[in-house]
Amino acid sequence: MGKMAVGAAVVCAAAVCASAALVVRHRMKSSGKWAQALAILKELDEKCGTPISKLKQVADAMTVEMHAGLASEGGSKLKMIISYVDNLPTGDEKGLFYALDLGGTNFRVLRVLLGGKESPVVKLESEEVSIPPHLMTGSSDALFDYIASALAKFVATESEDLHVSPGRQRELGFTFSFPVRQTSISSGTLIKWTKGFSIDDTVGQDVVGELTKAMERAGLDMRVAALVNDTIGTLAGGRYYNPDVVAAVILGTGTNAAYIECAHAIPKWHGLLPKSGDMVINMEWGNFRSSHLPLTEYDEALDAESLNPGEQIFEKIISGMYLGEIVRRVLFKMAEEAAFFGDTVPPKLRIPFILRTPHMSAMHHDTSPDLKVVGAKLKDILEISNTSLKMRKVIVELCDIVAARGARLSAAGIVGILKKLGRDTVKDGEKQKSVVALDGGLYEHYTKFRDCMESTLRELLGEEVYENIAIELSNDGSGIGAALLAASHSQYIEVDES
């Protein structure tokens, strides 16, 4: 072997050794990074922990805040708004009623024919109308004239078999999903617009008055019988079909709860006690907060960067608007600190709210052996390709941690309401059925969230109590529910009963 050949062999061997060392170093580095990513996940799991002892503290705190909010205005983070709904539907309601559901960039008009116990909803017709953007920032008259005109056109399509009795005024339930200071069952002043609306001359005005004047201008003879929000509509819809319904919870993009309280248990109520003895309370439970809530650095950062820092803390950890965003924030930290997706942070991962809760749910429910749905979602939404199976498994686990915390805290909130009503125990063997009406896409479509929430309720209440508790899906509270409340608060009730 010549000197040159020996030299070349030595150089070659050195190169092989160097590259082998690089591979080993890379493996050590990548295993170090992997350990770092797993450490981030483990820390999140610990911080999001919801052992039963903690959930019981959350439920107790919810009950305490409910008492405080009923005692005085501003006495609690829970507003505990008196809704003036003291008559919930019984199932006996008959006749034709309308509903208007205004809660965003579209509104719906509905016509419902009620047939009493024998045939509850005989006929239902509805139409959706989108609001032109210029009307969302124009004048109050322009917006309400547009709505009244669409309502008048809808009324004009009543068929022969669908009209009110002669000499009677049409009646409407108005679901208005913006912050309102309710002053009676059929009046309330707008506190502020949200969701992209900004019409200064409506703020401080009675929204029923604004709609009524617009209907008069449109030549439409219709009375607003009830002004409600979607949670109270859900309660009404649930109660119409099942007299054991005591509360309603919305778990969708946002979250809220309403329940039936004894009027004499509301110290801040100064009016005459209603004949029924009951009053529906709109809790606005999204604003609940307690030192017992398991909050993480991701929740604190999300809250600080939100449009309403310090507000709606409960909503920000349990509702559909935020769950996917929490997952994104954790993935971003893994990418930045543990090079989870390689040496550079994927640019799309920096965009707030790009990962929505339906995407998270699809990944969480992936049962394919290679988790191909997870791979596809990462590629389509975040433009991250070439993910390994073990990376995908970590992402599924991350979705599970965030969803389970939200579901278990939702269950604790429901137990808080049942405690306030004295329905969290079995009294002397009496079998008192308590039904909670639930609505919202998060509950309806995110199966693992729903299953986890229901199994946590069972765990918190114990088998004997849980046997007497039921959760029922109550769809379209903001539509049918509002029409039912118009029926139960109709000006013709006394006439019909006599």
Image: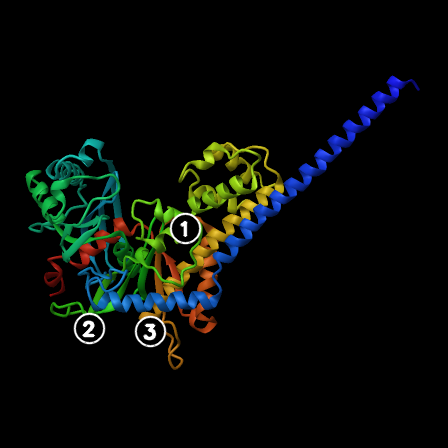
* Element assignment for label 2: helix
- The quadrant of the picture occupied by the C terminus is bottom left
User: SS of the residue at dot 1?
Assistant: helix
Q: Nearer the viewer, residue 253 or 167?
A: 253
Rendered location of residue 305, percent (x, y): 35, 44
Query: Label 2 belongs to which residue?
Result: 264
Q: Residue at x 50, y 48 (%)?
A: 399
Q: Amino acid at mark 1?
A: Asp
Q: Which residue is mark 3?
A: 422
* Front-lying residue, 145 or 50: 50
Q: Position of residue 326 (x, y in %)?
A: 44, 47
| Label 3 Cα neighbours within 10 Å, binned few <14 / some 14-19 / many ≥20 | few
For the residues labelled 2 and 3, say whether their Cβ atoms are less than 8 Å apart: no
As helix, strand or loop, the secondary structure at mark 3 comes to loop
Locate residue 371 relative to residue 470 in the image: left or right.
right
The tag on residue 299 is 1
Q: Nearer the viewer, mark 1 or mark 3?
A: 1
**Could you tell me the amino acid type at mark 3?**
Gly
